[in-house]
Amino acid sequence: MTTDTAPARWDRRIRQRLAHGEAAALGELYDRFASLVHALALRVLGDESDADRLTCEVFAHVWENPGAYDPKEGPLRSWLADLTHRQAVERLRRTGAADGSSPQEIEEKVRAASAAARADYIVSSMPAPLRAAVDLAYLRRLDYRASAAVLGVTEDEARRRLRLGLQLLATAHQGPRAASPPVTGGAR
């Protein structure tokens, strides 16, 4: 059984191994979080090849700067999501400026992409029962009664799970939170 301290312990161990230049640690980190990093990059950038490049850049940054992550600041997963989000937004701003987009158009695109990326991160971080309820309701278009039958729970429990999942998702449009990638200010 995993305890609440197990992920924090793993995060600290990986950071130490990276600081010692252990390439296998980077491989483990990549195996564990590459899909998260790529999905967030793709959500913000909207282009598969740009997301692939950014994914490589994020892990290269981690390899070159293992001390940049501080386990006291929170989980490694959240730090990687934040790093990915910040780099993707910076790239989006640079490419928007290069395309001749107005600052207002660029910022609107950044806000929309940031909200979508936060929503993706929130859904991927939800406990499995909540994620399943949201999936059934919104992707499969099932009502709470049908969802309850599929999940094998009471209708009240299906409604509760869906309500909690939606409350978490609502935070994606309320701006940054500690558990989600923040929207950065202006370009650096």
Image: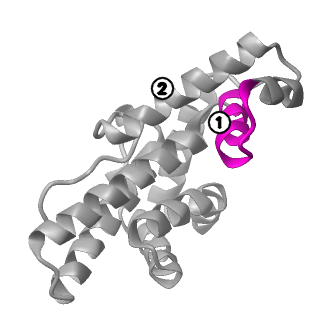
Q: Tell me the quadrant of the picture where the N terminus can be found.
A: top right
Could you say whether the residue bearing mark 2 is in a helix, strand or loop?
helix
- Front in this rendered view, residue 145 or 58: 145
Please determine whether, in this image, residue 174 is positioned above or below residue 108. above
Residue depicted at 40% across the width and 57% down the height: 66
Name which quarter of the figure residue 109 lies in: bottom left
Quarter of the image for residue 155 reads top right
Residue interval drawn in magenta: 128-144
Q: Which residue is mark 2?
A: 167
Q: Main secondary structure of the magenta part?
A: helix
Q: Is residue 56 above or below residue 154?
A: below
- Answer with left or right where residue 99 lies relative to residue 145: left
Quarter holding residue 136? top right
Tell me if residue 184 can be seen: yes
Q: Which residue is mark 1?
A: 134
**Residue 17 in picture, x, y percent from top left:** 54, 54
Crowding around mark 2 (Cα neighbors within 10 Å: few <14, some 14 to 19, many 20+) is few
Residue 141 painted magenta = yes
Q: Please say if the residues under marks 1 and 2 sit with CB atoms less than 8 Å apart.
A: no
Q: Is residue 30 left or right of residue 152?
A: left
* Viewer-side residue, 72 vs 162: 162
Residue in the picture at 65% in, 36% down: 134
| Residue at image point 39% right, 40% down | 172
Indicate the quadrant containing the C terminus: top left, top right, bottom left or bottom right: bottom left
Q: Amino acid at mark 1?
A: Val
Marks 1 and 2 sit apart, C-alpha to C-alpha, by 11 Å
